[in-house]
Image (tube, rainbow, N blue to C red):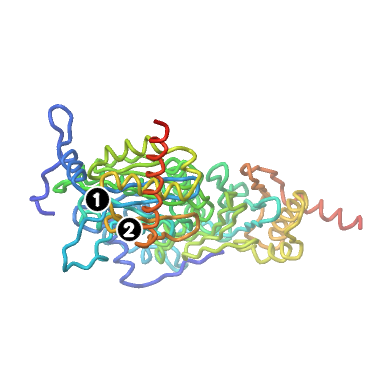
């Protein structure tokens, strides 16, 4: 127990802010965008894939992580911090299965991650985690969920959300476009997530990564061809919309 | 009747040190990551053991018949529980013995953990009563944190994991955790050796051998509620008749979907004459 770790790093400012937490949130805003959409029987995660250097292997950059058979996580922010959180969450999923003989509910694992983040905002010698996470999956009873956590340790459930760079315009787009109709149609949910991402990402299937989960099925990462197919469909729909508008005039 | 087995091992000493050190550990920085979050599921409640004292050795002193100081533990009992189509029947006797002396005929051997979980007591009375109350606390914390009732599987596992930490230190407990959760009626046998099993019928205690005989011959999954209650009562009666360490009254509970219901408390002497009369009528 070295005395060098006695000092608290995250302390209140005179007007009630925890600046370290707010700086962590700034770090999140610099991270690449992640989008999550929850339908009635499907959950979709989409992340912006940063361009890789010529010599870099593409597949080593994975921003969507599997926490358990029925839970997946995408994050925006510090990748190294995310690795630690993901490891802890994976262990907790198994511990829970061992002690309670039931797979974790989405709420439970989100609460665990959020509590972990909060602990680091109140510990000696430590800084907060610099990432926000989008956690998706299905509970044992078949209900889909999408949760978001942020560096302060709060968590909320969402129908659709975006984190990272340009999160605000993406969220506004989602607010406009998310309807119950969309939620009821699996294909529409996937397209919505893709459309939201394409708002801020350079157009092209190479720059996005999409993952889809259905009840009692494993997480499915969409192949490049499938993503291109969806993008083509979206383009077509946009053209048709434009045509209709022209005709009305 | 359960005997305490003594295990001489350095692991016991290590366990003692670990238990007392946990109380000394407050902040977890940089250290073992398993204690970072004090969750009901990932931590266990330990009470501190005096540093440097080996509980097994000191217990041996008191249970050795040749020693000067003698503490007889309350042992000897018959408890049973069985699942059937309408839930779980739990029936227990009420006698506590210390050696050859009957200490009480009015012991409550069913512990009401919460309105939908019951635990039975066999072996050391204090061990059962204390740890099942700790279990009740953990179950309530689980309920508050997760906004839903704890499952019987999870509750029994919590108890089994807690007592496993004290394995070899002289705990004597053979309990059945009974309840009704979203998977239906649940019945688990948990003991201080760390055993945890699920089945349709269990009987625990010195009189269990007699109870099993009657229980096994009369058991069917599709019993009616009255038939099941009668079977439970009869099995305990027969055990108290033959086992010297069981007796007093039969306390009977019925675990339903809406929770447990206390059915009856019947003196075994009354049952004796009742069954005798039934036999003579035939």
Horizontally, residue B8 falls left or right of residue B70, namely: left
Q: Quadrant of the N terminus of chain A?
A: bottom left
Residue A202 badge: 1
User: Which circle marks residue A32 in the picture?
Assistant: none
Give whichever of discs 2 and 1 has the lower sequence position.
2
Q: Which residue is at the front of the view, B35 or B50?
A: B35
Q: Find numbered disc 1 in the image and state the secondary structure of the residue it sits on.
A: loop
Q: Is residue B40 visible?
A: no
- Which label number is shown at residue A65? 2
- The chain letter under disc 1 is A
Foreground residue, A214 or A56?
Answer: A56
Would residue A138 appear left or right of B37 to someone viewing this image? right
Looking at this view, is A3 or B70 the one in front? A3
Kindly state the secondary structure of the residue where label 2 is placed: strand
Locate residue A156, reporting x and y percent.
36, 39
Q: Residue at x 29, y 59 (%)?
A: A87
């Amino acid at each position: 127990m070295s005395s060098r770790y006695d000092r608290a790093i995250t302390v209140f400012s005179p007007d009630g802010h925890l600046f370290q937490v707010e700086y962590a949130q700034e770090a999140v805003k610099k991270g690449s965008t992640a989008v999550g959409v929850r339908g009635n029987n499907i959950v979709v995660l989409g992340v912006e894939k940063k361009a890789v250097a010529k010599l870099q292997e593409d597949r080593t950059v994975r921003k969507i992580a599997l926490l358990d058979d029925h839970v997946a996580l995408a994050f925006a922010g510090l990748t190294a911090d995310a690795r630690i959180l993901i490891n802890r969450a994976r262990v907790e999923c198994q511990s829970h299965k061992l002690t309670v003989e039931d797979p974790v509910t989405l709420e439970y694992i989100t609460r665990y991650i959020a509590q972990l983040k909060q602990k680091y905002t109140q510990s000696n010698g430590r800084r907060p985690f610099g990432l926000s996470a989008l956690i998706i999956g299905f509970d044992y009873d078949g209900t889909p969920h999408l949760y978001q956590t942020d560096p302060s340790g709060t968590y909320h459930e969402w129908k659709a959300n975006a984190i990272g760079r340009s999160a605000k315009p993406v969220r506004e787009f989602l607010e406009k476009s998310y309807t119950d109709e969309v939620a009821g149609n699996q294909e529409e949910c996937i397209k919505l997530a893709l459309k939201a991402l394409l708002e801020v990402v350079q157009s092209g299937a190479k720059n996005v990564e999409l993952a889809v989960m259905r009840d009692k099925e494993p997480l499915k990462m969409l192949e490049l061809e499938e993503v291109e197919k969806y993008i083509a469909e979206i383009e077509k729909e946009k053209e048709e919309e434009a045509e209709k508008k022209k005709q009305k005039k | 009747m359960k005997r305490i087995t003594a295990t001489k091992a350095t692991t016991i000493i290590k366990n003692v040190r670990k238990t007392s050190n946990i109380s000394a550990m407050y902040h977890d920085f940089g250290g073992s990551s398993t204690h970072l979050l004090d969750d009901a599921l990932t931590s266990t409640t330990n009470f501190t053991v005096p540093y440097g004292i080996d509980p097994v050795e000191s217990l041996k002193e008191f249970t050795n018949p040749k020693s000067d100081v003698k503490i007889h533990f309350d042992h000897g009992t018959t408890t049973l529980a069985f699942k059937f189509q309408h839930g779980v029947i739990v029936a227990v006797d009420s006698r506590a013995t210390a050696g050859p002396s009957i200490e009480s005929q009015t012991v409550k051997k069913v512990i009401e953990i919460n309105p939908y979980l019951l635990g039975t007591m066999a072996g050391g009375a204090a061990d059962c009563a204390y740890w099942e109350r700790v279990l009740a606390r953990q179950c309530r914390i689980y309920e508050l944190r997760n906004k839903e009732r704890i499952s019987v599987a999870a509750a029994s596992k919590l108890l089994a994991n807690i007592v496993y930490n004290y394995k070899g230190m002289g705990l004597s407990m053979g309990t059945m955790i009974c309840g009704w959760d979203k998977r239906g009626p649940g019945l688990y046998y948990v003991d201080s050796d760390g055993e945890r099993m699920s089945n349709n019928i269990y009987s625990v205690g010195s009189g269990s051998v007699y109870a099993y005989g009657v229980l096994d011959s009369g058991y069917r999954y599709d019993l009616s509620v009255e038939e099941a209650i009668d079977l439970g009562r009869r099995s305990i009666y027969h055990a108290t008749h033959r086992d010297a360490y069981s007796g007093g009254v039969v306390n009977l509970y019925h675990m339903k979907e809406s929770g447990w219901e206390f059915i009856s408390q019947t003196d075994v002497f009354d049952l004796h004459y009742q069954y005798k009369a039934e036999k003579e009528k035939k």
